[in-house]
């Protein structure tokens, strides 16, 4: 169906949201799926951030190293699972695998007796693996179900459902952590994950009814083996470009995360107050993100294209790190985090997911999961140890922030190159 004809035949809500007739049910399931995944994660995120600081901000580098090691163990297992089992099975199983572990964490923490610092470090590493897998699998399924043209129109709206989940999850933690403590919130997160598993299965079934070929895709394994994702990335210049883009993003994010941890640890000394601060920060990020996603994202992607949309976040990062280098204060780092993360969720992340739409299914699950987990955590490692090296050289907060500026400029150039490559791939893609 022609997009303009579809919009003329749609109702006011469909025109406002750029939804075409016949897409509503599939879109609603994708929105529910994203809401549940991110609500589950944002219940845990403030707890993870507080536990990371509780053991000392100087230990963050080692926590990121542990996270990379854990990712190396889990990612090949996921690749092997997706190679052997069909989508309708391995996607829900992924969420239930993590939900069971959340229940186990609850049992340990509720019983008491565990060293809080050790338990916090284990939880930090585990959640840092958890969030990448559950988010990567969500976007992989969405990119598998929707077509290129739909992705440009609808991924911003789907991301708005994600943001609502983040708002609700962060608000739940901010409201309840002081009354109930941390352990009961793990059960809340596990229940939300079970809902996400059910929504993912329903989305696959619905797409199988509505879209040509989706029933076959939902029931067919991807093939390959545990190392298929690595081989696919190394064999594709386009995927290598995405890997470099993600690496530069995560290096900058880790620089900012460590700077934030040091500034917050000095400015706020009480643990519950820090957890509440992080939760409020998450809510502010998600409110701004939701505003942008519902008013800007779809139109920017459709009119400016993927490359220009990807370039917004690196440009903002250049400016933000420059200001932080001049004034490394709590207000500045909080404002920069809110703006940068909102731009990532509202613009960079939807555009980055559109990069995968014209690719083969194995790239969407196996290669993408490798990129979103191992490469992401490799960027963490590069960022956190580089920050420690800069501090060892005596640069401090100002020097670390200043060092991130040229990296952001390189990242900006790469966004433009990726956008051009994607345009060529999309033009060659067969019609739906």
Image (cartoon, helix red, strand yellow):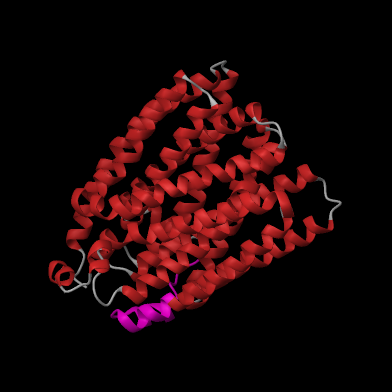
In the rendered image, which quarter is residue 110 located in?
Answer: bottom right
Is residue 215 highlighted in magenta?
Answer: yes
Q: Quick check: 179 left or right of 146?
A: right
Drawn side of residue 289 relative to residue 16, left or right: right
Q: Residue at x 43, y 72 (%)?
A: 222
61 to 363, vertically: above or below? above
Horizontal and vertical percent position of residue 293: 34, 53
Figure quadrant of the N terminus: bottom left
- Residue 233 in view here: yes
Q: Quadrant of the C terminus?
A: bottom left
Q: Which residue is at a point 58% across and 66% down the rendered structure image? A: 192
Q: Quadrant of residue 265?
A: top right
Q: Residue at x 13, y 71 (%)?
A: 5
Residue nearest the viewer, comparing 311 with 49: 49
Residue that appears at 40% across and 29% down: 320
* Residue 108 percent coordinates (x, y): 79, 58
Q: Which residues are magenta?
A: 203-226
Q: Position of residue 115 (x, y in %)?
A: 82, 46
Seen in the picture, residue 95 relative to 384 is either above or below; the reply is: below
Q: Is residue 86 visible?
A: no
């Amino acid at each position: 169906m022609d997009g303009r004809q579809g919009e003329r035949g749609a109702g006011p809500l469909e025109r406002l949201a750029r939804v075409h007739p016949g897409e509503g049910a599939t879109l609603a399931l994708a929105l529910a799926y994203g809401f549940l995944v991110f609500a589950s994660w944002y219940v845990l995120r403030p707890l993870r951030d507080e536990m990371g600081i509780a053991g000392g901000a100087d230990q963050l580098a080692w926590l990121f190293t542990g996270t990379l090691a854990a990712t190396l163990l889990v990612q090949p297992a996921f690749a092997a699972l997706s190679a052997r089992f069909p989508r309708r099975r391995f996607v829900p199983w992924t969420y239930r695998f993590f939900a069971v572990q959340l229940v186990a964490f609850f049992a340990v923490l509720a019983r008491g007796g565990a060293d809080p610092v050790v338990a916090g470090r284990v939880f930090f590493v585990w959640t840092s693996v958890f969030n990448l897998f559950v988010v990567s699998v969500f976007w992989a399924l969405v990119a598998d179900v929707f077509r290129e043209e739909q992705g440009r129109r609808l991924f911003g709206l789907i991301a708005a459902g994600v943001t609502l989940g983040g708002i609700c999850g962060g608000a739940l933690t901010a409201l309840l952590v002081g009354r109930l403590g941390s352990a009961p919130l793990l059960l809340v997160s596990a229940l939300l994950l079970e809902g996400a598993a059910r929504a993912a299965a329903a989305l696959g079934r619905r797409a199988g009814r509505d879209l040509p070929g989706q029933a076959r895709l939902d029931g067919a394994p991807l093939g390959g083996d545990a190392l298929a994702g690595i081989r696919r990335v190394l064999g594709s210049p386009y995927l290598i470009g995405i890997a470099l883009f993600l690496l530069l993003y995560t290096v900058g994010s880790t620089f900012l995360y460590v700077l934030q941890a040091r500034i917050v640890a000095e400015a706020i000394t009480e643990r519950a107050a820090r957890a509440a601060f992080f939760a409020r920060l998450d809510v502010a990020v998600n409110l701004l993100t939701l505003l942008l996603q519902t008013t800007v994202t779809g139109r920017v992607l459709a009119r400016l294209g993927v490359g220009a949309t990807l370039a917004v976040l690196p440009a903002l990062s250049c400016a933000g790190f420059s200001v932080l280098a001049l004034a490394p204060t709590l207000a500045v780092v909080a404002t920069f985090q809110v703006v940068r993360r909102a731009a990532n969720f509202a613009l960079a992340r939807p555009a980055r997911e559109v990069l995968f739409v014209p690719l083969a299914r194995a790239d969407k699950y196996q290669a993408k999961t490798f990129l979103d987990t191992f490469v992401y955590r490799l960027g963490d490692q590069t960022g956190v140890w580089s920050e420690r090296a800069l501090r060892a050289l005596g640069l401090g907060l100002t020097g670390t922030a200043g060092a991130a500026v040229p990296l952001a400029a390189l990242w900006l150039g790469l966004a433009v190159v990726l956008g051009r490559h994607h345009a060529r791939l999309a033009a060659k893609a067969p019609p739906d």
